[in-house]
C-alpha cells in the first residue's frame, strides 16, 4: 500500500448521446428566483454538519428532498467508528480501513478521517446526542472488519435517528439558516464553468432557480437503482446524476456496497439487519442450519461486508435457496432484545422473535462508494461546488467501505465542506448575486407516451440481476444495451414530476455504474466479476473516472 495517490483512468464514452445537460427547459425571465450565500443540497448528516460551519452572517439555505428526517443518515443502525477505548489506536483503525478497502484507499484521507473521529463524536455529545452508556462510559460495539471495540451507538440499533435528532435541533437554532423541505433538486446551474446554484421544484410546483455564491452537495446515495436495497425511497442517485450532468468528475462508480444481511420476507420492506448483530455474536446459517461462513473466511461472520455478501450468494446458489438465516438463539435472550429493540420490533411484526427464531436475510444494495471526486478540502472539480457524504468519492473507502465509517465520513467532510464554502462565500459576498443569462430550450412534449413506474421497475430489476453482487461481461453488456435504449427516449423528454426526474436520474447513474463495471476486468472489494475472479494490482490498482 503506497502513500502516493493512485492513478486515475478516464472512461471515455459519447455521454452526450444519452444524457442531456439539463432535464427541464430554463427560461429565467419566466421563472421564480431565490438568492442565498450558501446553498446546501441535502439534509442528512453531512449537510447538517456543513451548515454548522457557515458564518452566521451568511444567508444559508438547506434544501431537502423530503422531510428532514427522511435520509439515509436517519436510517443508519450500527453506529460511528471511532478510536475511544484506551487499548485501541489510530493506527489500528487506519489499518482496518485500508485492509477493507482492498488496496484502493487514499492513505492520507484515511489517516485524516480516523484521527478526527474522536473530536467529531465529542461534538455530537456536546450538541445533545445521547449515545448508549454503561456506568457513565460509552458502550463500544464491534462490527465486521474491525480489530477492536470502537462502534459508538445509540438507542441500541438506531444510532442515525438519535444523531439526526440532536443535529436537527442544533441547526434549527441558527437564525441564518433556512430549511426548505420537499424541495427536489432537478439540476445544478452552471455558467462559464462555475456552479451558481440549482434548479429546484418546491412542493411539486414549477421549477425555480436558486442562485448561490457557493453550493454544497450532500444528497446521499443511490440504492434505489436496485430492486433490493436497504435505502429509503428517496435514495435515487439525484446528486450523482446532477453532478455528472453539470460536468463534475465522477469516480469509482462501479463500487456499490451490498449489505450482507437485509430482512427477506415476502410483503416486508427490505429492512437492514445491522452488522452489529453479528458483532454481538449472531451466526449465519443456511436452510439446513449449517454455519457456512467457516467455508469461506477464517473471520467467519466478522469478515468485511464484501466477503460476507459474496459468501451468502455462493451459499444460496449451492443450496438453491432464496436466502440464508441469522440466528441468535445461542445468546442471552434478554440482552438480544434490549440491544436491538428496533430490529426486534420489525421482526415481531412478521411473527419472528429475534432471540429464538432464525431471521431470513440476503444481500441488498446499501452504500455507494463512488461519486463526485473531492479533494482533501471537500472541493469538487467544478468551481463553486463542494461535496460531502455518500454522494462523494473521497478515497476513504477504497473498493469496500469498512462498517460504520460512513457517518464518520459525513461528519468529517461535512465540517470541511462547510468551513471552506463559508470562507469562499464570505469573500464573494461583496459581489451582488444576480440572474445570469442561462437558457435551455424546450425539447419534446412533456407528457411522454410511456409508463414511468413500469420502466423504473424494469431498470431496477435489470440492475439487480446484471449489475448486482456478481457480475460478468455478457450480463453487463446486456444491461448496458437496455439502459441505453431507455435513456434514448426517457432522457429526451422534458418531464414535469418528481417521479419522472427520479427515473431519469436512476438511468443516468445506472449507465455510469454499468459502464465502469464493464471496464474494470478484475474483482476487487464490492466489485465481483465472476469472469475475472482475481484482483489484478498490476493493471487495475487505479481509479476509473467519468466526466460528461
Image (cartoon, rainbow, N blue to C red):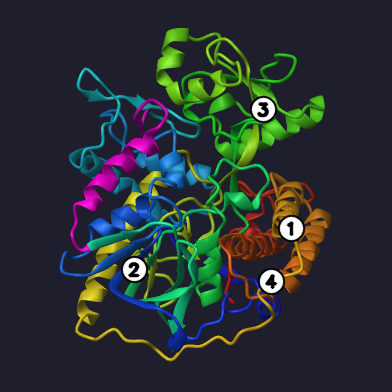
At mark 3, the secondary structure is: loop
Q: CA distance from mark 3 to mark 4?
A: 37 Å
User: Which residue matches tag 3?
Assistant: 265
- Whichever of callouts 1 and 2 sits on the residue coming sooner in the sequence is 2
At mark 4, the secondary structure is: loop
- Would residue 365 appear left or right of 383 to someone viewing this image? right
User: Is residue 404 shown in magenta?
Assistant: no
Q: CA distance from mark 2 to mark 3?
A: 41 Å
Q: Nearer the viewer, residue 538 or 279?
A: 279
User: Which residue matches tag 4?
Assistant: 447
- Category of crowding for the residue at label 4, using alpha-carbon neighbours closer than 10 angstroms: few (below 14), some (14–19), many (at least 20): few
User: Is residue 154 shown in magenta?
Assistant: yes
- Whichever of callouts 4 and 1 sits on the residue coming sooner in the sequence is 4
Quadrant including the C terminus: bottom right
Q: CA distance from mark 1 to mark 2?
A: 32 Å
At mark 1, the secondary structure is: helix
- The answer to whether mark 3 and mark 4 are in CB contact below 8 A is no
Q: CA distance from mark 3 to mark 1?
A: 25 Å
- Whichever of callouts 3 and 4 sits on the residue coming sooner in the sequence is 3
- Whichever of callouts 4 and 2 sits on the residue coming sooner in the sequence is 2
**Residue drawn at (74%, 58%) of the image:** 455
Q: Is residue 392 above or below residue 135?
A: below
Q: CA distance from mark 4 to mark 1?
A: 15 Å
Query: Mark on residue 39?
Result: 2
Residue 456 percent location from the top left of the image: 70, 56
Q: Nearer the viewer, residue 166 or 413?
A: 166
Residue 1 percent location from the top left of the image: 49, 52
Amino acid at each position: 500500500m503506497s502513500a502516493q495517490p493512485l492513478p486515475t483512468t478516464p472512461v471515455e464514452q459519447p455521454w452526450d448521446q444519452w444524457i442531456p445537460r439539463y432535464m427541464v427547459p430554463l427560461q429565467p425571465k419566466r421563472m421564480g428566483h431565490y438568492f442565498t450565500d450558501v446553498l446546501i443540497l441535502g439534509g442528512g448528516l453531512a449537510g447538517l454538519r456543513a451548515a454548522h460551519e457557515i458564518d452566521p452572517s451568511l444567508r444559508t439555505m438547506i434544501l431537502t428532498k423530503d422531510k428532514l428526517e427522511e435520509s439515509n443518515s436517519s436510517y443508519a443502525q450500527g453506529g460511528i467508528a471511532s478510536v475511544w477505548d484506551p487499548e485501541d489506536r489510530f493506527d489500528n483503525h487506519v489499518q482496518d480501513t485500508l485492509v477493507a478497502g482492498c488496496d484502493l484507499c487514499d492513505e492520507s484521507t484515511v489517516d485524516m478521517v480516523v484521527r478526527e473521529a474522536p473530536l467529531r463524536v465529542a461534538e455530537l455529545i456536546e450538541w445533545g446526542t445521547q449515545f448508549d452508556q454503561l456506568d457513565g462510559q460509552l458502550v463500544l460495539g464491534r462490527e465486521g472488519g474491525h480489530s477492536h471495540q470502537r462502534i459508538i451507538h445509540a438507542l441500541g440499533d438506531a444510532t442515525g435517528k438519535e444523531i439526526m435528532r440532536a443535529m436537527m435541533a442544533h441547526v434549527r437554532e441558527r437564525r441564518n439558516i433556512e430549511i426548505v423541505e420537499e424541495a427536489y433538486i432537478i439540476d445544478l446551474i452552471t455558467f462559464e464553468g462555475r456552479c451558481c446554484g440549482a434548479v429546484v421544484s418546491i412542493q411539486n410546483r414549477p421549477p425555480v432557480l436558486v442562485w448561490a455564491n457557493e453550493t454544497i452537495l450532500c444528497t446521499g446515495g443511490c440504492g434505489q437503482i436496485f430492486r433490493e436495497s436497504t435505502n429509503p425511497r428517496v435514495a435515487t442517485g439525484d446528486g450523482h446524476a446532477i453532478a455528472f450532468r453539470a460536468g463534475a468528475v465522477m469516480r469509482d462508480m462501479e463500487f456499490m456496497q451490498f449489505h450482507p444481511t437485509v430482512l427477506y420476507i415476502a410483503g416486508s420492506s427490505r429492512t437492514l439487519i445491522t452488522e452489529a448483530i453479528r458483532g454481538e455474536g449472531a451466526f449465519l446459517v443456511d436452510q439446513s442450519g449449517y454455519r457456512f461462513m467457516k467455508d469461506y473466511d477464517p473471520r467467519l461472520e466478522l469478515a468485511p461486508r464484501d466477503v460476507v455478501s459474496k459468501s451468502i450468494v455462493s451459499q444460496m446458489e449451492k443450496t438453491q435457496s432464496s436466502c440464508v438465516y441469522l440466528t441468535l438463539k445461542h445468546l442471552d435472550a434478554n440482552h438480544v432484545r434490549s440491544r436491538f429493540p428496533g430490529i426486534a420490533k420489525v421482526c415481531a411484526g412478521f411473527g419472528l422473535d429475534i432471540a429464538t427464531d432464525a431471521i431470513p436475510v440476503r444481500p441488498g444494495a446499501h452504500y455507494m462508494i463512488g461519486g463526485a471526486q473531492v479533494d482533501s478540502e471537500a472541493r469538487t472539480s467544478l468551481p463553486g461546488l463542494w461535496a460531502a457524504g455518500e454522494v462523494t468519492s473521497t478515497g476513504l473507502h477504497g473498493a469496500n467501505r469498512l462498517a460504520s465509517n460512513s457517518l464518520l465520513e459525513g461528519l468529517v467532510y461535512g465540517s470541511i465542506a462547510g468551513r471552506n464554502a463559508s470562507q469562499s462565500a464570505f469573500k464573494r459576498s461583496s459581489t451582488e448575486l444576480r440572474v445570469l443569462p442561462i437558457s435551455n430550450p424546450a425539447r419534446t412534449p412533456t407528457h411522454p407516451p410511456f409508463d414511468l413506474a413500469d420502466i423504473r421497475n424494469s431498470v431496477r430489476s435489470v440492475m439487480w440481476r446484471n449489475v448486482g453482487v456478481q457480475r460478468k461481461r455478457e450480463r453487463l453488456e446486456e444491461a448496458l444495451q437496455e439502459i441505453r435504449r431507455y435513456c434514448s427516449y426517457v432522457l429526451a423528454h422534458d418531464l414535469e414530476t418528481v417521479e419522472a426526474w427520479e427515473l431519469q436520474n436512476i438511468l443516468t447513474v445506472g449507465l455510469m455504474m454499468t459502464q465502469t463495471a464493464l471496464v474494470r476486468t478484475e474483482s476487487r472489494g464490492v466489485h465481483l466479476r465472476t469472469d475475472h475472479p482475481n484482483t489484478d494490482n498490476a493493471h487495475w490498482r487505479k481509479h476509473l473516472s467519468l466526466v460528461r
